[in-house]
Structures are given as structure tokens and as C-alpha cells.
Amino acid sequence: MSMKGFRRMLLGEKMPDRNDPQYKERYEREVSAGRKFARITRIDKVAAKVQGFANLHRTLFLVIVFGFIAASLAWNIYRLSVVFHRPAQRTATEMQDSVLHLRRTLPLPHKVQPINKEKR
């Protein structure tokens, strides 16, 4: 990597100005593409309706937005506490190792002969 590319990576490039003739065509093309995408997906109409609701009901809109944020934060804290206090789960390998260890350490019980039902 050249020194110029390294410096550009660390410091970044100069931000293009929309009135700069060098970037004006690119800026207009990107803005028109964004507007076309918003129109096709109808994001522009949804945003206008949300803005209209927010203008008519300012307090209710703020309560809804901050209520959603508070509920999300509370849900995240709840999930963190549930995960943190959950007992450690044992894997199948750990269970097999513990069973084998018990078999090696405990004495074997006397073998019991099966009862033959035919001789009764």
C-alpha cells in the first residue's frame, strides 16, 4: 500500500460538497436513486404519515418512542439476567465422562442370576 493510500485510510478523504462541480453529478444521481427507492418501496408516504402524526400528537409520539426504547432496554436487561443466572449446561461428552468415571471408581455389584421362568 502506498503512503498516499495509507494516509487516506487513516485520515479519510475530503468530504465532497454537493455544490462542488466535481461531485455535483454524482450527488444528484445518488439523491435521485434514493428518492426513486423511497417512492417504489413507499417509505416516503410512511415517513410523511409518521411525521404528520408526530406533529399532531407530540406528547403521545414522544411517549410511544421513549416507551419503546425503555421497553427494549428492559427486555435486554431481563434476557441478560436470565442467561447469566442459567446453570451451566453439560455437554454429552461431559456426561459420558462422568458416567465412565463413576464406573471406574464404584465397586461393581454382585451379578444377579436371572430367574428362569421355565423351571418354576
Image (cartoon, rainbow, N blue to C red):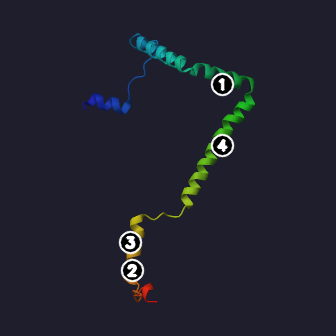
| Above or below: residue 72 compared with residue 6 | below
Q: Secondary structure at mark 2?
A: helix
Query: Is 75 left, or right, of 6 in this rendering?
Result: right
In this rendering, the label closer to the viewer, 3 or 4: 3
Q: In the rendered image, which residue does mark 1 sit on?
A: 50
Residue 12 image offset from top left, x and y in percent: 38, 29
First in sequence: mark 1 or mark 2? 1
Circle 1: is it few (<14), some (14-19), or many (20+) Cα within 10 Å?
few
Spatial CA span between label 3 and label 2: 10 Å
- Residue at coordinates 66% horizontally, 21% vertically from top-left? 49
Q: Is residue 19 left or right of residue 56?
A: left
Q: Check if mark 1's residue and mark 2's residue have beta carbons within 8 Å.
A: no
Per the model, the C-alpha gap separating discs 1 and 4 is 20 Å
Amino acid on which disc 3 is placed? Asp
Q: What residue sits 43% from the left and 63% below the top?
A: 91
> Looking at numbered disc 4 in the image, what kind of residue is underneath it?
Ala
Question: What label sits on residue 70 in the rendered view?
Answer: 4
Tag of residue 103:
2
Amino acid carrying label 1: it is Val
Report the residue at 68% width, 39% height from top.
67
